[in-house]
Amino acid sequence: MYRKIKQELISQEEIQEKIAQVGTTLTQQYQGKPLLLLCILKGSFIFMADLCRAIKTPCEIAFMAAKSYSATESTGKVEITLDIAHDLSKYHVLIVEDIIDTGITLAAITDILKQRNPLSLKIVTLLDKPSKRKNSLKADISLFTVPDLFVIGYGLDCSEHYRELPYIGVYDDE
Ligand code: IMP
Ligand code: MG
């Protein structure tokens, strides 16, 4: 089952170039503001590590985890498995997500976070798969739009494998 990669979809260089651009935008946007980068585990951990270093204004880092996916099928149910204890009324919160597919996970997370009255709440996602959306959820910044394929690498997994790949590939399910 290991190394079933059909093709490279987004190269390491393309990812890093986009992150540098988005980092510049976010640096300007959050300059002088108390910024909390909120990484949604596990898929976003590598994106978060690169993005936080591309943002040249002070920030705090926090992690949340939600479960909504088993293998390649969305279950449609969201469970918060790791939460934060921050007083969000003191922070501009930027959610850092790996991929928005149906949008179910992030809709649930944003609903919960809004109730905690953050100074602002925005979403940056590495990948957007708009063809699969089941609600009106939109990222404020999306680095790449991907077709309806199961993608892996750069943090994204298939049954916990492939997260360590430096690029985004298409999973070969044949
Ligand atoms: P959603 O709730 O359907 O938007 O799914 C969100 C989560 O499902 C993402 O944060 C990923 O962890 C996972 N996911 C969705 N599509 C893919 C994919 O193509 N590859 C790997 N993980 C995916
Ligand atoms: Mg995720």
Image: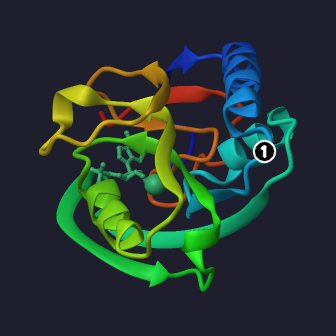
Residue at image location 87% in from the left, 36% down from the top: 56
Q: Is residue 170 visible?
A: no
Residue at image location 55% in from the left, 72% down from the top: 89
18 w.r.t. 93: above or below: above
Residue 84 in the figure: left or right of residue 47: left
CA neighbours of label 1 inside 10 A, class few (<14), some (14 to 19), many (20+):
many
Measured from the top left, where is residue 50 in percent x and y?
78, 39
Which corner quadrant holds the C terminus? top left
In the picture as drawn, the residue positioned furthest to the left comes out as 134
Look at the numbered disc 1 and give the secondary structure of its residue: helix
Residue named by callout 1: 52
Residue 154 in the figure: left or right of residue 142: right
Q: Amino acid at mark 1?
A: Cys
Residue 110 picture quarter? bottom left
Residue 78 picture quarter? bottom left
Measured from the top left, where is residue 73 in percent x and y?
22, 54
Mark 1 CB lies closer than 8 A to ligand 2: no
Is residue 33 or residue 111 the one in the foreground? 33
Q: Is residue 119 visible?
A: yes
Is residue 23 or residue 169 the one in the foreground? 23
Q: How is the image coloured?
A: rainbow
Number of numbered labels in the structure image: 1
Is residue 61 or residue 66 the one in the foreground? 61
78 w.r.t. 119: above or below: below
Measured from the top left, where is residue 69 in percent x and y?
31, 62
18 w.r.t. 78: above or below: above
Residue 112 in the figure: left or right of residue 54: left
Residue at image location 85% in from the left, 41% down from the top: 57
Residue at image location 29% in from the left, 66% down from the top: 111
Is residue 8 or residue 147 the one in the foreground? 147
Measured from the top left, where is residue 86 in percent x and y?
63, 80
